[in-house]
Image (cartoon, helix red, strand yellow):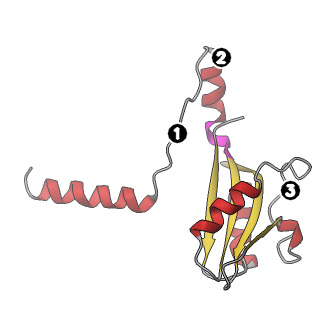
Amino acid sequence: MGPAELLVLAFPRQTITVEAATVLGKLRTGGDIRVVDSLVVTRHVDGEATYGELADYDDLRGIVPDGHADLPLIGPEDAQEAAELLVPGTVALLVLIEHVWAREAAEALSAVGGRIASGVRIPPEHIDEAVRAAEAHRAAGK
């Protein structure tokens, strides 16, 4: 298996639309990622948090494969941590993905006794900020 990552995809309403879940379904068909597990976490207006599988939602059933439905890898602790990131009245889709594109590199490293020891996800807005700072630095002649 290649490197894996747990993503928390937040949405500004209490339900995930079919369109939003379909986008994720299309990503997995590109072959770059494999959805290993997923979980929906809702933070209700009163602050209470609940969670459930995509299959629990009629409109979302089958959009993303069940992954390890018999052995869920995203659990209640993950759901609680994600709920703390949400403002009341919003929802998140937790998705455990495998970076299939990196599987070959991981296998090659393993063959020579190496491994991918760590990875850090850098949010796109941080990269945009760094690019703007570098451009400003260059424009200032430094």
Image quadrant where residue 13 sits: bottom right
Residue depicted at 61% across the width and 37% down the height: 102
Q: Nearer the viewer, residue 105 or 3?
A: 3
Element type at mark 3: loop
Disc 3 marks a residue whose amino acid type is: Asp
Question: Nearer the N terminus, badge 3 or badge 2?
Answer: 3
For the record, the magenta segment spans: 98-102
Q: Nearer the viewer, residue 106 or 38?
A: 38
Q: Position of residue 14 (x, y in %)?
A: 70, 82
Q: Position of residue 129 (x, y in %)?
A: 32, 61
In the displayed structure, 65 sits above or below 87; it is above
- Whether residue 101 appears in magenta in the rendering, the answer is yes
Horizontally, residue 65 falls left or right of residue 21, namely right
Cα distance between the residues tagged 1 and 2:
20 Å
Q: Position of residue 136 (x, y in %)?
A: 17, 60
- CB within 8 Å, label 3 to label 2: no
Q: Position of residue 69 (x, y in %)?
A: 88, 53
Residue depicted at 92% across the width and 49% down the height: 70
Disc 2 marks a residue whose amino acid type is: Ala
Which one is closest to the eye, mark 1 or mark 2? 1
In the displayed structure, 42 sits above or below 128; it is below
Question: Disc 2 designates what residue?
Answer: 111
Cα distance between the residues tagged 3 and 1:
26 Å
In the displayed structure, 88 sits above or below 81; it is below
- Work out which residue is located at the far right of the displayed protein and give it: 70
Question: Disc 3 designates what residue?
Answer: 66
Image quadrant where residue 64 sits: bottom right
Question: Disc 1 designates what residue?
Answer: 119
